[in-house]
Amino acid sequence: MKRLFIASLLAAGMLMSSGSQAASLLNVSYDVMRDFYKDYNTAFQKHWQALGNEPLTIEMSHGGSSKQAAAVIDGLPADVITMNMATDINALYDRGQLIPQNWATRLPDNSAPFTSATVFVVRKGNPKNLKDWPDLLNRGVEVVVPNPKTSGNGRYTYLSAWGYVLKHGGDEHAASDFVGKLFKQAPVLVTGGRAATTTFMEKQSGDVLITFENEAEMIAREFGRGSFELVYPSVSAEAEPPVAVVDKVVDKKGTRKEAEAYLRYLWSDEAQRIAANNYLRPRNPAILAEFADRFPKVEFLSVVKTFGEWPQIQKTHFSDGGVFDQVYSGQK
């Protein structure tokens, strides 16, 4: 049983911190948040010990958001889960009763401490002249994007493209036709945002990578700022990555105090500045203003106002047999 448990952790991509005597938290997160939580965890540990608490070990697991949520439902013992959209946290209630239904009300801003925009990462010189969503449908353009069935990144791409059509006078039929064509421009749908980056940057496959603006900054740090160009499309669904304590785990482990403090500190001034330094848009308007030079103004679409509540979005668009499956397979 012990070997099986260890194997499951390794399969989930866990990065273990040292210090077996310290109390520990496991944060199960999504692909493109590695750099943010590397910085944030160090800051939180210093803050936590400054309050007179014992040192705390923080362990991380990263992967495609929906796959990560499924791993927690299947038994990965996350104290906290930090995803890029509410559907993946809702699943912990719907499929596992691991959290209460009202989990999003327990922290400010519907439990989403920052926001992000969807951007196009294109080859240097933008040889295909890709400026907005319709350009991605041009003949010969290969799109690199994660699968919306496994990745929040992919779902925000889908919703942004759908919203673009609605903003320009199209109806639901036109929007479904547009997103179906867009995803067929992708030769392969990878499972998560980091896999998409690897495909585009390391394998040099595709003409455009669709991702979050904070991942674009991570690409710049890793591969160099002159290795690509960044394009902001005219419309982006506003990404609001939420966080939650996993109640059944923390109550069993006795780590509720630590887990709640870990998430609450995301709204501190220090954490909001760490977010901005990692190209996540802070919720604190004063801190957002401090970093205005790195966050171009974007025409954000509110996902809930445009598409309805997340459970309905998931059921309509991304569940098995939903609209995405229909348009991708050509059934609609």
Image (cartoon, helix red, strand yellow):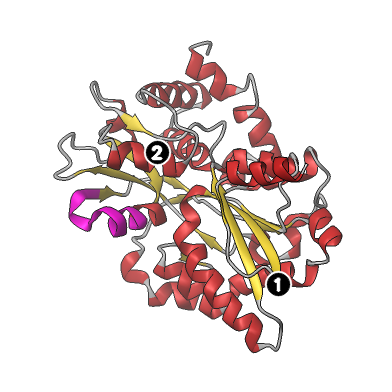
Residue located at (65% from left, 81% from top): 48
Position of 261 relative to 194 (above/below): below
Q: Amino acid type of disc 1? A: Gln
**Could you classify mark 2 by the number of other residues whose Cα lies within 10 Å: few (under 14), some (14-19), or many (20 or more)?**
many
Q: Amino acid type of disc 2? A: Ala
Determine which quarter of the picture holds residue 179: top left
Position of 143 relative to 85 (above/below): above
SS class, disc 2: helix
In the image, taking residue 208 as reference, residue 1 lies left or right, namely right
In the image, taking residue 268 as reference, residue 105 lies left or right, namely right
Q: Position of residue 141 (x, y in %)?
A: 26, 27
- Front tag of 1 and 2: 1
Labels 1 and 2: the sequence-earlier one: 1
SS class, disc 1: loop
Numbered range of the magenta stretch: 217-229
Residue 309 visible in the snapshot: no
Residue located at (64% from left, 63% from top): 109
Residue 40 visible in the snapshot: yes
In the image, residue 64 lies in the stretch drawn in magenta: no
Residue holding disc 1: 21
